[in-house]
């Protein structure tokens, strides 16, 4: 098992396969997009598999594939097929915006993908276009229904944004009445390519979201949260699905965090809010052995910030401004 300097077990890797995305969600990047990395600077699939094999040998048991949008990268299924054959991995999960995912859903089921997180911030076509700046609502909904048809456990990730989609909170909750889906409301974060829009006061934080839900669903029940969960879990009696609320900006879950991240360019992040610890891609391309890669990870975990606030303070400019697309959603 891997442990950090705060004696937290580390068994979960979030691996971003690309910084490219086919949407332009305003909470993730500016309208004109971002400066994408040169393709030669991205980790190859072979390098990703080497990293996952080494990390799995140390105790990583769960991998989530993220982006950008994973399916923008060519031959993405090749990576998933190969990753399935790593014996120590117990769960392979996927986060996608759903635009290009529909043709692959049946194979995702056959591969045994454990869960799929579908990014969907609204059920209203016009608001979808306003938020994403792209007319892809039908494609995303087709993927959503295909995931349900294949009985792949599905979570909807909805970023709650003041003045943008708070009218969608209740319609999203209503999805859980008849469908076996988990709808997760996420606090807006400053990873938008521009920086923090709200200062220290977030208009719709996790407390406000819960209060809004209780005002309309007085019988809302708090569930037991699984170990290392980033979400607070709730259930409405009579509903098939569940609700989660992720305090991603408030960072109330850091004390039990069990995850690390690798960006598309190979930067290891031991916290979402840190500036990156070292570049594992460079070590690989300099000829480092698996043993040296393992030692580098183990050493990095001994300097891990205790929470996201400390990680942010350690940044050289003390400010988060990069796009979520560049670090892995």
Image (spheres, helix red, strand yellow):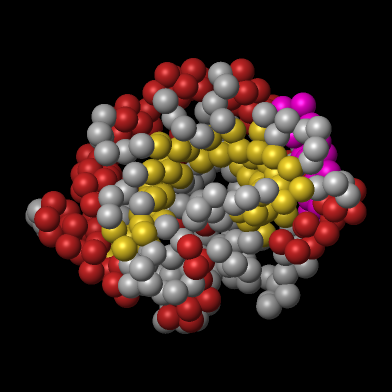
Say if 223 sits above or below 115 in the image.
Answer: below
Label the magenta part by its dominant secondary structure: helix
Q: Residue 156 or 329: which is nearer the viewer?
A: 156
Q: Examine the rendered structure and indicate whether residue 143 appears above or below residue 236.
A: above
What span is in magenta?
Answer: 163-179
Is residue 165 a member of the stretch shown in magenta?
Answer: yes
**Image position of 321 (left or right of 79):** right
Q: Does residue 248 sit above or below 80 in this rendering?
A: below
Where does residue 199 sit, x and y in percent of width and height? 68, 77
The residue closer to the viewer here, 141 or 271, is 271
Residue 199 is at least partly visible in this image:
yes
Question: Residue 45, position in %: x, y?
Answer: 27, 39
Image height check: is 91 above or below 179? below
Residue 324 within the magenta-colored segment of the rendering: no
Q: Is residue 268 left or right of residue 29?
A: left
Image quadrant occupied by the N terminus: bottom left
Residue at image location 79% in from the left, 62% down from the top: 208
Residue 77 pos. (x, y %): 37, 28
What residue do we see at 20% from left, 64% from top? Answer: 296
Q: How many marks?
A: 0
Q: Residue at x 44, y 74 (%)?
A: 306
Q: Tell me where residue 316 sits by quadrant.
A: bottom left
The residue under the point 51% across, 34% down is 115
């Amino acid at each position: 098992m891997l442990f950090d300097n705060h004696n937290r077990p580390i068994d979960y890797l979030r691996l971003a396969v690309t910084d490219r995305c086919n949407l332009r969600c305003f909470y993730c990047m500016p309208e004109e997009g971002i400066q994408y990395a040169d393709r030669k600077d991205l980790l190859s699939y072979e390098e990703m598999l080497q990293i996952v094999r080494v990390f799995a040998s140390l105790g990583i048991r769960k991998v989530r594939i993220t982006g950008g949008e994973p399916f923008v990268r060519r031959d993405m299924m090749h990576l998933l097929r190969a990753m399935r054959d790593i014996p120590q991995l117990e769960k392979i999960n996927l986060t996608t915006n759903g635009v290009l995912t529909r043709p692959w859903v049946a194979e995702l089921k056959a591969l045994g993908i454990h869960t799929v997180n579908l990014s969907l911030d609204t059920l209203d076509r016009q608001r979808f276009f306003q938020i994403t700046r792209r007319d892809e609502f039908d494609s995303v909904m087709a993927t959503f229904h295909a995931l349900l048809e294949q009985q792949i456990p599905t979570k909807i990730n909805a970023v709650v944004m003041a003045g943008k989609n708070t009218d969608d909170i209740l319609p999203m909750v209503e999805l859980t009445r008849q469908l076996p889906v988990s709808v997760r409301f996420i606090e807006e974060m400053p990873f938008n390519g521009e920086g923090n829009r709200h200062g220290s006061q977030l208009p719709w934080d996790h407390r406000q979201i819960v209060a809004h839900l209780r005002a309309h669903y007085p019988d809302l029940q708090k569930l037991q949260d699984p170990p290392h969960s980033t979400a607070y879990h709730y259930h409405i009696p009579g509903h098939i699905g569940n609700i989660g609320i992720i305090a991603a900006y408030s960072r109330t879950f850091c004390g039990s965090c069990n995850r690390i991240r690798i960006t598309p360019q190979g930067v290891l992040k031991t916290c979402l809010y840190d500036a990156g610890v070292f570049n594992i891609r460079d070590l690989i391309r300099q000829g480092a052995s698996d043993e040296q890669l393992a030692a580098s990870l183990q050493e990095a975990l001994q300097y891990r910030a205790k929470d996201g606030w400390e990680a942010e303070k350690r940044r050289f400019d003390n400010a988060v401004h990069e796009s979520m697309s560049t670090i892995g959603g």
